[in-house]
Amino acid sequence: MDATLKTVIGGTLVELPGTIATIRATMPPGQAEAFDREIEHVPAVDLPAALVRWALAGTTADEEDDALFDRLARGEDIGAVPVDSDRPEVA
């Protein structure tokens, strides 16, 4: 069984491919070529973030993020709290 990445998109738990080979296998040829060109030059320390970004490329996660940032830009309270919050319900 290949490794997977798990995240929540649109309120639903989603499993994404979790290896270079399985991430690449989900892509159309042009995107796979761009992935190949980039991924072999990513510094090891940045590799996990790059793989997550590519794994999410075929999802609606970017649209969800864009909508959230639009709400923030309008000044809407989205329930976010600072990391250093003393609120016990935020852990």
Image (cartoon, rainbow, N blue to C red):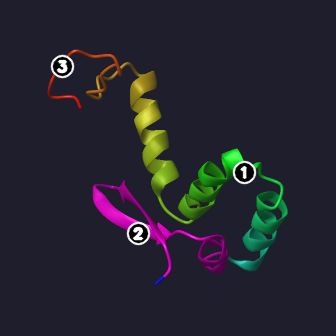
Give amino acid for label 2: Glu
Of 61 and 2, nearer the camera is: 2
Label for residue 15?
2
The magenta stretch is 2-27
Give amino acid for label 3: Arg
| SS assignment at label 2 | strand
**Image quadrant assignment for residue 87:** top left
Between label 1 and label 2, give the one nearer the viewer: 1
Give amino acid for label 1: Ala
What residue does disc 1 label? 44
| SS assignment at label 3 | loop
Number of dots carrying numbers: 3
Q: Earlier in the sequence, mark 2 or mark 3?
A: 2
Crowding near pointer 3: few (<14 within 10 Å), some, many (20+)?
few
Label for residue 76?
none
Report the Cα–Cα distance between label 2 and label 3: 31 Å
